[in-house]
Image (cartoon, helix red, strand yellow):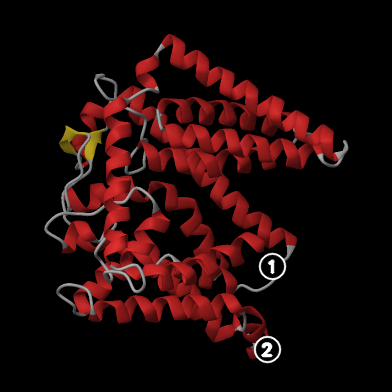
C-alpha cells in the first residue's frame, strides 16, 4: 500500500498537464479520476489488512465524526438545492468532499516509522522537483504558445467547462504569460511552490553534510523561488511572506528568547516586503492590477450577498464554487473557500467545516 501512495505523491504535481493531454489529445475522458482511484485502493487495502484495534485508534475521534457529518449534510442539502438529484450530489462532492479521501487514506497508515515517513516526503519532494524543472522547461524551451501540442486551448486567461486548459494566463494589460508549469494555472503553481519550498528546505538540512545533495537542493530552491515570482500570483507572494515568517520563528526559537524570535521574524518578513515594494516601484503593473483586484472584490461581494439569502442552511450543494460552473446557468465563484462553504451549506455547514479545519490545525 505504501508504494501505491509513493507513486501517487510523485506524480501528483503532473496531474493537470497529464490529464489535459490524455483527455484532449488521447481522448480518454475519465483519466482525471486516477488520483481518487489510487486513494481508494490505498484506503480499502489498508482497512482490509490493519488490525481492528489500530483502526479504532485511527478513526474513532472527533475528526471522523465531523467529516461524516459534513458529508451527510452535503448530501441532505441537495433536497433544497435547485434541480436536486444524484448527479448534483456527485458533482458537488467531487469538489467539496472527495479531498477528504486523502485524509482518510493517510490516517489508515496509522503511526509510521521514521524511515517510512521519510519515504513519503522524498516521493513528494523528488516528484515536485521533477515537475518544477519540467515546468520551467515547458515555459522557456517549449513556450506557452506551443502548449496547444498537448491539448491546451489556443486561448489565454479563460476557463471553459469540459474543454482544455488555456495555454496561459496573462498579466492584466500585459502580453506576459504567467508561469503555470505542469499545473492548471499560475495560482495553483504558486500554491504548490508554497508547499515545495519548505520541503526543499527540510531536505537541505537533512543532507547538509553531503555536498552534491546540498548543491542540488540549493539549486532547486533557487529555481522554485524564480518560478514563484514568475507566477505573478499576489496571493502566493503574500503566502510566501507569511511562510517565511513561520520558518524563521521555528528556526530561531531553539536559539533565542521569544522577543528575539519575533524581531528576527519581523525583520525577515520586512525584507521580503521591501523586495515587493521595489517590484511595485519598478514594475507596478506586475502587482497593482486594478481590474483584477476589482473583479476579486465584486465576486466576494456577490458570494456574501448569496450567503445572506439563506444564512442558516445555505442554498445547497453545487450552487457555488467550481461545481456551479457545471450545474448553474451563471457560475458563482466567491473567491474564498470558507465563503463558498457558507453559501452552499450555511452556518451549519460552515461550523462543521471549521471544526474539521480546526482539528487539523491543532494536529
Q: What residue is at 47 percent from the left and 43 percent from the top?
A: 192
Horizontal placement of 65 versus 338: left or right? right
Judge whether 158 appears above or below 289 on screen.
below
Q: What residue is at 34 percent from the left and 67 percent from the top?
A: 311
Q: Is residue 301 visible?
A: yes
**Residue 112 bears which disc, if any?**
1
Q: Residue furthest top?
A: 282
Viewer-nearest of discs 2 and 1:
2
Q: What residue is at 24 percent from the left and 19 percent from the top?
A: 175
Place of residue 224 in the rendered image (x, y in percent of width and height, measured from the top left): 52, 31
Horizontal placement of 217 versus 84: left or right? right
Place of residue 219 in the rendered image (x, y in percent of width and height, measured from the top left): 59, 26
Crowdedness of circle 1 by 10 Å Cα count: few (<14), some, many (20+)?
Answer: few
Q: Which residue is mark 2?
A: 53
Quadrant position of residue 109: bottom right
Judge whether 360 appears above or below 54 on screen.
above
Mark toward the start of the polypeptide (2 vs 1) = 2
Q: Quadrant of the C terminus?
A: bottom right
Q: Quadrant of the N terminus?
A: bottom right
Residue situated in front as seen by the camera: 332 or 135: 332
Q: Secondary structure at mark 2?
A: helix
Judge whether 229 appears above or below 53 on screen.
above
Quadrant position of residue 57: bottom right
Place of residue 289 in the rendered image (x, y in percent of width and height, measured from the top left): 33, 25
Quadrant position of residue 47: bottom right
Q: CA distance from mark 2 to mark 1?
A: 16 Å
Residue situated in front as seen by the camera: 237 or 177: 237
Q: Is residue 215 visible?
A: no
Q: What residue is at 21 percent from the left and 79 percent from the top?
A: 86
Q: Residue furthest left?
A: 329
**Residue 65 bears which disc, if any?**
none
Tag 2 and tag 1, C-beta contact below 8 Å: no
Amino acid at each position: 500500500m505504501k508504494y501505491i501512495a509513493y507513486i501517487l505523491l510523485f506524480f501528483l504535481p503532473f496531474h493537470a498537464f497529464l490529464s489535459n493531454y490524455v483527455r484532449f489529445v488521447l481522448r480518454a475522458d475519465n483519466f482525471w479520476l486516477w488520483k481518487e482511484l489510487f486513494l481508494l485502493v490505498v484506503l480499502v487495502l489498508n482497512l482490509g489488512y490493519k488490525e481492528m484495534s489500530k483502526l479504532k485508534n485511527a478513526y474513532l475521534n472527533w475528526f471522523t465524526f465531523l467529516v461524516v457529518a459534513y458529508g451527510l449534510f452535503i448530501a441532505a442539502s441537495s433536497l433544497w438545492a435547485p434541480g436536486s438529484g444524484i448527479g448534483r450530489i456527485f458533482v458537488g462532492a467531487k469538489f467539496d468532499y472527495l479531498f477528504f479521501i486523502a485524509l482518510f487514506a493517510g490516517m489508515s497508515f496509522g503511526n509510521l516509522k521514521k524511515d517510512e515517513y521519510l519515504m513519503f516526503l522524498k516521493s513528494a519532494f523528488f516528484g515536485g522537483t521533477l515537475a518544477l524543472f519540467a515546468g520551467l522547461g515547458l515555459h522557456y524551451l517549449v513556450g506557452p504558445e506551443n502548449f496547444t501540442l498537448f491539448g491546451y486551448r489556443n486561448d489565454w486567461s479563460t476557463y471553459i467547462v469540459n474543454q482544455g486548459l488555456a495555454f496561459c494566463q496573462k498579466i492584466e494589460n500585459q502580453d506576459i504569460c504567467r508561469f503555470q508549469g505542469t499545473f492548471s494555472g499560475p495560482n495553483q503553481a504558486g500554491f504548490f511552490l508554497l508547499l515545495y519550498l519548505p520541503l526543499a528546505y527540510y531536505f537541505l538540512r537533512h543532507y547538509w553534510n553531503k555536498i552534491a545533495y546540498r548543491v542540488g537542493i540549493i539549486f532547486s530552491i533557487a529555481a522554485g523561488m524564480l518560478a514563484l515570482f514568475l507566477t505573478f500570483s499576489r496571493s502566493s507572494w503574500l503566502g510566501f511572506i507569511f511562510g517565511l515568517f513561520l520558518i524563521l520563528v521555528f528556526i530561531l526559537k531553539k536559539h533565542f528568547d521569544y522577543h528575539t524570535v519575533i524581531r528576527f521574524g519581523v525583520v525577515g518578513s520586512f525584507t521580503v516586503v521591501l523586495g515587493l515594494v521595489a517590484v511595485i516601484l519598478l514594475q507596478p503593473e506586475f502587482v497593482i492590477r486594478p481590474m483584477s483586484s476589482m473583479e476579486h472584490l465584486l465576486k466576494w461581494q456577490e458570494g456574501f450577498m448569496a450567503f445572506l439569502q439563506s444564512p442558516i442552511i445555505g442554498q445547497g450543494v453545487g450552487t457555488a464554487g467550481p461545481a456551479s460552473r457545471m450545474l448553474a446557468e451563471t457560475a458563482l465563484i466567491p473567491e474564498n473557500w470558507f465563503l463558498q462553504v457558507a453559501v452552499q451549506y450555511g452556518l451549519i455547514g460552515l461550523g462543521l467545516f471549521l471544526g474539521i479545519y480546526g482539528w487539523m490545525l491543532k494536529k
